[in-house]
Image (cartoon, helix red, strand yellow):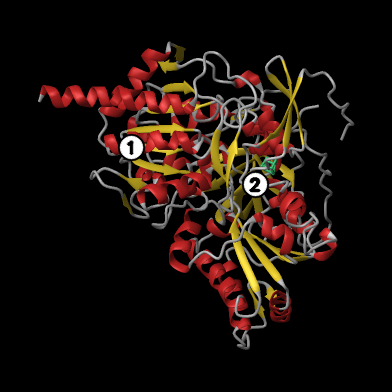
Amino acid sequence: MTYIEKPPVPNVVKYDEPMATKRNKLEVMLNTGSDIYQGACKKRGSTLKDEYRHASGTAYMDPRDMARLGVKNWDTALVKTDWGEVVVFTAHSRDAPHEGQIFICKGPWANVIVSPETYCCCDPTYKGVEATIEKTDKEPLLMADLMAEVYMKYDKDAEKSTNRLTEKKINVGITKPEE
Amino acid sequence: MAYEEPITDYDEIVENCTCAFCGCNCDDLTYLIKDGHVVGVRHACRLGASKVMEDMDQRLLVPMIRNEEGDLVETDWDTALDKAAELIAGSVRPVFYGWSETSVETMKHGIRLGELVGAVLDNQATICHGPSLQAVQNAGYPVNTLGEVKNRADMIVYSGNNAMNSHPRHLGRYSAFPRGYFRKRGRFDKTIVTMDPRYTDTAKMSDIWVGFEQNGDYEFYNAMRAVLRGKKLKKDVISGIPKEDIEDLVEAMKTTQYGSLFFGLGLTHTLSKQRNIDIAINLIQDLNKFTKWNLVPMRGHFNVNGFNIFMAFEMGFPYGVDFSRGYPRYMNGETNTIDLLTREEPDVFMVIAADPGAHFPGGANRHLANIPVIQIDIHWGPSTEIADIVLPGSFIGVEAAGTSYRMDGVPIYMKKAIDKPETCRDDEWIVRELHERVQKIKGSQIASK
Ligand code: SF4
């Protein structure tokens, strides 16, 4: 058993109430922060492994929102904000209910989409960012691939100018292999 | 979760070690050591144990430099240090970021190096409790120690923070559960309140959960202050909380004997930022008209407070100190790492014991891809992916000794338990060595003029 094994999360049940109509895209508020699994995974130094992708690259959602979007635990979703977009897993939040909010742990995945705006007080806005979430068939990238894809530091072909805030050329996620 | 057999296979026990993870700095850990490795930890929480019993797969063992193809290749210490010193000496606007997971002794050399080259020295506070430090400058700092909380407090408030996840032993060791001198029955003598928009794990085990709206903290605190000053609330619902509930809560806070408020990043990261903390401090000051209240920010890394205290003591400013004019300057929104990076100012970035790859917003990190990055760390992590020179340090509290400051400002000496891997060096040694080499380069530049 590893230290980061998560307790099982219940699977999503479909709510058959009028509010639970299926949508393709939800407008949500994005919060980030730390959680114990992500912290343990990061500090013991297993960031290159798949467990970090699951611990950090997961959007925790309210089960009703998940039903609306038609996603199950460990399905994948595309989260977009004004600052970028990233593919993450979806999972049932242990803190639910909190409709209209998603929580992504601090880490390279959340960083792509949070706001670097500090409003002159040194601290970027990590919480309360407006976002949209939609179902996708791409899969989240592993940490090293994500860093290479987003920041393109050693990509000779990458235009220097694409590497700036103003021109967002971020396309993060890989297409799932055919089963 | 599966039952795990206790560890019986070890050669040696080292007692009273200090955990090097979160701001609680639990100093009662016992390490079980076999063949020079920590195979087990007693008393630590899940986070502390995961860090102390590290995963050796990703340990950085040898210095590395990026080659032309963009791969990190191993090299010897001399080459790596010379290359790093050359970059630092030749830079116009260097930023030295990090320091929170290393000892105060290392920071001492860091300041000398920063002063020499006119760098900006900044630490993790800039992306977590920076607003709190500004608020402390604005509104004061009614602080207490964690020992007082344990012995005296009968009401403990967690605001915008999930201690069960980020500081797992905080409730068990300092606040809710321990039996204190005046609180003989432990948990039964204490009221735990959580104020957080999320129903977190901490909220689940508290007596009262106040789930105000997202970004509603400023309004909520102001409403509490108004009630405290005897005003009538005009709205029925404030930040999603019925006004009767606010009145009850304030009444409970007023009639307690000794209260302590712990606040976390839930307050500093939302839109009102430092104004949230201002108002929280003012609330504490108002409450002090009736009874004794104090507050403590929940600091994340074990020595993030150490850097702020050390910097404030040495240079007069807690973080984001700019030496570019030869004397220390500090200007929020100007000399802080995130603002510097989004404005694309720095031309060399040194990361020591920190992980911007995992913590900075993408918009700030993108500039790191354009400039040389020097990393001093113990693990291969997100930052290593964008680093050009990697210098493997050692693990404070396990492989190296050093001083750190707990979240309430109590200094703790962390002792050494095992030897570091042969090819690694102490952080203190690395920074001192960099300083010497940079000084040599600068000296010859002046001589040739
Ligand atoms: S609470 Fe913090 S300092 Fe204490 S053992 Fe856990 S991680 Fe370490």
Q: Is residue B149 left or right of residue A172?
A: right
Residue type at tag 2: Cys
SS type, badge 2: loop
Residue type at tag 1: Gly
Q: Position of residue B439 (x, y in %)?
A: 27, 26
Identify the mark nearer the N-term, 2 or 1.
Answer: 2
Identified at 68% across, 44% down, the residue is: A35
Quadrant (top left, top right, bottom left, bottom right) of the C terminus of chain A: top right
Identified at 44% across, 24% down, the residue is: B429
Say if B212 sits above or below B150 in the image: below
Residue picked out by circle 1 = B114
The residue closer to the viewer here, B287 or B344, is B287
Q: How many marks?
A: 2
Say if A104 sits above or below B390 in the image: below
Identified at 84% across, 44% down, the residue is: A10
Q: Residue B24, labelled with which disc?
A: 2
SS type, badge 1: helix
Chain where mark 1 sits: B
Quadrant (top left, top right, bottom left, bottom right) of the N terminus of chain A: top right
Q: Quadrant of residue B179?
A: bottom right
Q: Position of residue B165 (x, y in %)?
A: 70, 47
Identified at 67% across, 78% down, the residue is: B237
Decide: few, some or many residues near mark 2? Use Cα within 10 Å; few <14, some 14-19, many ≥20. many
Q: Is residue A62 left or right of residue B314?
A: right
Q: Position of residue A18 (x, y in %)?
A: 79, 62
Q: Quadrant of residue A54?
A: top right
- Ligand 1 visible in quadrant: top right
Q: Is ligand 1 within 8 Å of the beta carbon of the residue shown at mark 1?
A: no
The residue closer to the viewer here, A147 or B91, is B91
Query: Taking the image as drawn, is residue B404 in sight?
Result: yes
